[in-house]
Amino acid sequence: MNWLKKYQTELVLLIGIVLVYGITAYFNDAYIERFQYNVTTLILHPAAILGIFALGAAVVIISGGIDLSSGSMIALSAATVCLLMVLFSHWGFATDGRLPAWCIAAAMGATLLMGLLVGTIHTWLITVVQLPPFVATLASLVGLRSLAIIMNKAVTASMGNQSIKVNVNDPTFFTIGEQWWIAMAVFLVLALFLYVILNHTVLGRHLYALGGNEQAAKLSGIRTERLKWFAYSFAAFTAAVAGILFAARIQQSDPESQGRAGELFAIAAAVIGGCSLAGGIGRVTGVVLGAIFLRTVIDAVAKLVTAGSDDFEGMIVGLLVVLAVAFNQLTDSKEGWRKQFFPGFFGTAALASVSLLVMAVASFSLRMSGRETAWRDGILAGVLTAIVLTVFKLVAIFAKRERARVATSGNLP
Amino acid sequence: MSVTASAANPLIEVRKVTKRFGGTTALDQVSVTVEAGELLAICGENGAGKSTLMKILCGQYTEYEGEVLLRGQPLRLSGIKDAEAHGISIIHQELNLVEELSIAANIFLGREMVRGGFFLANGEMNRRAGEILTQLECRIPPETLAGQLRIGDQQLVEIAKALSLGSDVLIMDEPTSALTEAESARLDRVIGQLRQRGVTILYISHKMEEIFRLADRIVVLRDGKNVTTVKREEVTPREVAHLMVGRELNWDRQPHGEKDSEYSVVLEVCQLSRRWPQHPREWKLREVSFTARAGEILGFAGLMGAGRTELFECLYGNSDDEVLGDIFLAGKRVRFEHPAEAIAAGMAMVTEDRKRLGLFANLNVGENMTLNSLHQDRNAARIVEKGRETKRCRDMVGQLQVKTAGLQAAIGSLSGGNQQKCVMGRALLTQPQVLLLDDPTRGVDVGAKAEIYRLIRDLAQRGMCVLMASSELPELLHLCDRLIVLNEGRITAEFSAAEATEQAIMEAATVNSAKGRGPSDQNLGGGS
């Protein structure tokens, strides 16, 4: 029972993954017919890459901070690894169009090292210059992607024709990007490493303490700045790993699109996996399942509306994050599900806005999946939402009146 | 509102008000009457219930037993806004200004003047604010940001706010605690002015001199009960100090042995001073010197803000201010830059504000206890061995008799006393030479207090050097072998257990420490 309560989030996510997959399979035959392709290429491979840098985001969140830079860090590391490999072959290290293993290892090693450097800079900005983590990593969010673009342009220009994208044609690199189990293995190794750190080392315990109460942590003799160094470096490192895998997957560095909004996906996976943005709470198992769940839902929606999954990603992530956080807060709060969701005049305005949003989402999504009656159905969905929510509001108002009546009739004048 | 003083019909009447926080009773059947137009001083030790009573009067605490009458009518305030609507305002010790807004914006915060129903009437607000400030002898432009003001001026802004609300009852909670002499004098004049207008003032203060200069009557609270209300002319400061502390001791005094020769000096502090940036007092601590021996319990008495916590912070390496002077631990000169260094050298501290500085709500009981000493449980591979951790933790839970459902229980599920034992356990698991206890029994019920006392005495008997600060004098008298009294950052007295009495300590803690200053220091004080 205790165990069940502790791993509630993980359990809900597991059930959710199976359920979402099952429902999609029911409506879409491709899920059964091309089972292996769907599970590995469309769900587990991207989920593993997302999970890798979600682990980094989770460590930072557990320590009470936030890292907004991972998306741009992915672009930068993809650029770095590609440029280094291109340079290596430019300098004639390649034989038969194939770089020797040490060249690839060196390119990756340098990229990972750069991740650690970025993490160090973040930590310095946060602990010494005393910028809020939000600001320090926001600067990287906008800055690093721009740096990646400039790097690509500068190096390609020096080699002949200037371009934003850098292509790599190397069979070894191709294999690394193509095989889903490589990404998965890296993901699981990193997850295991982080699991051991968080659950079985002093460092891990101190990270939770830091996230729970920074002042008390310092008074307990914890060197908080060193912990932050670990957290932000690990976050940037995992983003670098993900960047290499992204680049390998498409044999290209494309800093304008690679890893865009990645930081938000990572934070979303961590939050869906049960991390509290207030810090101090979160588990590796939750983050792993959170990433897989997020990917499963994105893919399911793509299948159901038979449109590019990319277009729907943002909407799904936004919805899931709101639901996950609201779910956690409602189960934790005293009021619980008795909370009045649309109180007062403002509540009515919110109610109308939510209904309109549902209407817009429904009609445009249905239209995109090719339904003729999309506009009518969308409006219907909006109206239905409004009616249901209004009923909820009225019930809540009457319940509150009733409680107030009971409370006052007894004692006070 | 017309205010007419008449003895028959008091302005405010507090009748048998009781306020409980969980298990502790902060106010017990307190009754006070306030006459219109008077200045009523309320005094008592730390924790006597003064602030609780004021928070009830200003609408901050809405749940209590008993009743409050305003002009003969029963009054049940629903909040601070409601109190303000009834003409009652409070000026807190910690001022509540929004530092990024101007003086005028602060004065009219929440009830801004508007033009055309929408646009801020800044000009009008500035003019009104300026008028009120001028009346209060404050010539600062009302456009100035509140954050740029000195504390004394910020306080005037709070008073101006109360006046602009048309308040005729003003509660002041230790208004001079952060003021310079000149600012205090100005406040005196402002109070005189307010009284001429018929404003009734409730004045909380520790400072006898002030109370006797300003008050008409004095209410003395002690342990949440009202002791007496006296007219100023009928008492002397000494008598009031006696009334404040003159409770019967709940415990027998322990026989304290002389511990001079047989035990070695563990901690020696020489001329320790700690700066107080941007504050008229300039020093949080000034030339503090003492020694502490192994096996000794050394007590630190003093009122709020006397520097007890600040001293412990210095010893524990948790001070961001400039610190002068020397600290010797076991004969070696030390200067800790971080609590980690202090812990490594054998110091441990139990902090004052358990919830804010002590507890980790996200960690369980066991994790809370082993946090400071977890590295002891690592094996060769630097992995924490849960078995070792659990064993150490379980031993400590047994030793301290912590009542908990288990090591896995949430720390929040424990009572205050047991939470405190966990925090002490955390300190003890580092096996310290010197243990700093800052108000270790705050918010702890009587039963747990007795256990904590026994524990402290045990620790001393086993040779630990215990430094203990407390706002409860009986506790210090009960436990300590020696007592040091701090007053505005200085040591004003030191007593052996045999010599110490509550009255003597109270006198040393409330005496105007400026009188004891040397000539050079007077320059320091007057320079502001």
Image (spheres, rainbow, N blue to C red):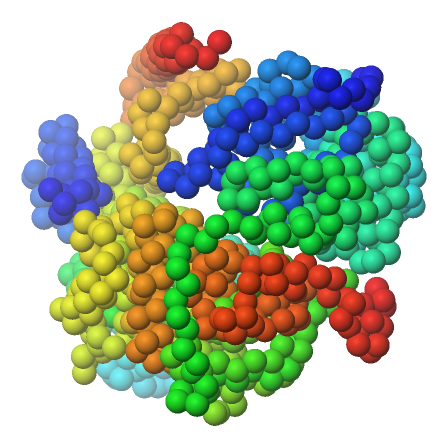
Q: How many marks?
A: 0
Residue A168 visible in this rendered orientation of the protein: no
At 82% from the left and 19% from the top, the residue drawn is: B4
* Residue A189 higher or lower than A335, as above or below: below
Residue closest to the eye, A215 or A44: A215
At 28% from the left and 76% from the top, the residue drawn is: B375
At 84% from the left and 77% from the top, the residue drawn is: B519
Residue closest to the eye, A44 or B54: B54
Q: Quadrant of residue B385?
A: bottom left
Q: Quadrant of residue B113?
A: top right
* Residue A99 higher or lower than A15, as above or below: below
Query: Which quadrant is the N terminus of chain B positioned in?
Result: top right
Image coordinates of residue B203 in percent, x first then y, are 71, 40
Residue B232 is left or right of residue A373, and the answer is right
Query: Which quadrant is the C terminus of chain B positioned in?
Result: bottom right
Image coordinates of residue A269 in percent, x first then y, are 31, 48
Residue closest to the eye, B215 or B134: B215
